[in-house]
Image: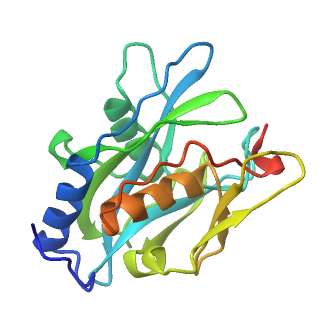
Amino acid sequence: MIPTPQFESCDHQTRLYGSENITSFSHESQPLGDLRAAAVAIVIAAHHGSPTVLLTRRSGTLRAHSGQWALPGGRLDAGESAEDAALRELKEEINLSLPRNAIIGRLDDYITRSGYRITPIVLWSGEESGHLRPNPDEVASIHTVSFKDLANPSAPQFEEVAESDRKVLSMKLSVDQIYAPTAAFLYQFREVGILGKNTRVLHYDQPRFAWK
């Protein structure tokens, strides 16, 4: 077993530790049925040398979920895998080109209230993220969330709401309080990739503002 890093550096040991946790996790796929297939990219990149995950704020001009927090991603093109879609969307949305060997693995599919089956793909960049520039048609701004912020015991929030018999999941982070579905991906990455736990998230709900 690789020793748990202190997450001070976005270095080779951090990559080995996260990769071992992700690849040993048995991710769960969900049937597509009448859902639309999509993928998001959970990209590990450096910010002032420390490991972080890239996060975006969606453009205010988009028809759906404008202005909301998101991971880079989108619908799969015909014949495209979730991995291919994640790599393509990274290039289109934040001008980040990564090779296929940057792919670490998958986390669980998440079904959204708006009719998507979203597959999260974990990728390693390891490079400083300050040079990245958003595509203004899709992304208003690019942000980072540190591993330390994600691993904070008080970050996950589980709220009971009148509209659902499932708890709504959010992550209270330094950048903002972020809700599912994005919070579901960040929370599972925290649990599996950072803390080495076997945690599922499909049973958590989204807040009503994210249903459409």
The residue that appears at 43% across and 40% down in the rendered structure is 108
Which percent across, then down, holds residue 188? 45, 56
Residue closest to the eye, 86 or 20: 20
The residue that appears at 82% across and 45% down in the rendered structure is 164
Quadrant for the C terminus in the image = top right
Which corner quadrant of the image does residue 45 belong to? bottom left
Which corner quadrant of the image does residue 64 belong to? top right
Q: How many marks?
A: 0
The residue that appears at 72% across and 42% down in the rendered structure is 62
Q: Which colour scheme is used?
A: rainbow
Quadrant for the N terminus in the image = bottom left
Residue closest to the eye, 33 or 158: 158
Which percent across, then down, holds residue 46? 30, 73
Residue closest to the eye, 70 or 164: 164
Horizontal placement of 208 versus 138: left or right?
right
User: Measured along the vertical axis of the image, is residue 119 above or below residue 45?
Assistant: above
User: Measured along the vertical axis of the image, is residue 18 above or below residue 58?
Assistant: below
Which percent across, then down, holds residue 97? 29, 48
The residue that appears at 48% across and 26% down in the rendered structure is 30
Which percent across, then down, holds residue 147? 38, 75
Outermost right residue: 162
Horizontal placement of 161 versus 94: left or right?
right
